[in-house]
Image: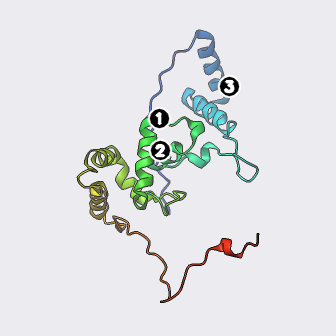
Amino acid sequence: MARPAAKTAKTEMLTIRLDPKTRFLLDYVARLNGQTITTVVERAIMAAASSNPIPGKDTYEADTTWQDIWHVSEGVRKLRVARIPEMYPTYEEERQLAFAKEHWPFFFEDAQGVSIISAYVDVLWPRIDEFVQMHEEGRSKDYFAAGAAMQEALREAKLRVPDWPLKPKSEPKREPGAFSRDLDDDIPF
């Protein structure tokens, strides 16, 4: 027989000031629905978030909702939020995203940064400020030191380590005696 899933303990606390009328309304809704005050607040927040999507930029892009941003990993959530101007990312979030983009093999599947590698982010994000500072302060002496430190952190977590530093793409090989043709040569004037 399968065990029932354990409930996750609630660890976040919110303190708000309410006037007596609003406090009464909160108690009223909780009693009327047989819920705790916490459940009433959580469901009201979820309903408000669900009814406030970020509009798509054009007709081909769907609206972004909180479900598109939410992830159990804090690092994944932070990277997703930092990419959305309508979420008003902080300077620190923009700084972390810029670092992640520059060191994309440690955070993303490709240089475009569309798909996040959750396993890497889970290991690296708790130390993200350390890696960013290491890069900013040490890049004039060893530009790739932060990447090497991240490789070591991933190695310790028994994860496959991405190649770093990235090797530049090589030019396509040309046949001996071949010449480059300018496409403008084909346009008659």
Q: Which residue is mark 2?
A: 78
Secondary-structure class at tag 2: helix
Specify which label sits upstream in the sequence, 3 or 1: 3
The answer to whether residue 131 is visible is: yes
**Amino acid type of the residue tagged 2 in the rendering:** Lys
Q: Which of the two labelled residues, at mark 1 and mark 2, occupies the earlier sequence position?
A: 2
Residue shown at 25% from the left, 55% from the top: 142
Q: Position of residue 52 (x, y in %)?
A: 67, 36
Tell me if 42 is positioned left or right of 78 in this view: right
For marks 3 and 2, the one nearer the N-term is 3
Residue type at numbered disc 3: Leu
| Position above or below: 36 against 63 | above
- The image quadrant where one finds the C terminus is bottom right
Task: Give the residue displayed 60% in from the left and 78% down from the top.
Answer: 181
Instruction: Determine which of the numbered discs, if any, sits on residue 90 in the image.
Output: 1
Q: In the rendering, at what x and y percent does residue 173 appear? A: 47, 83
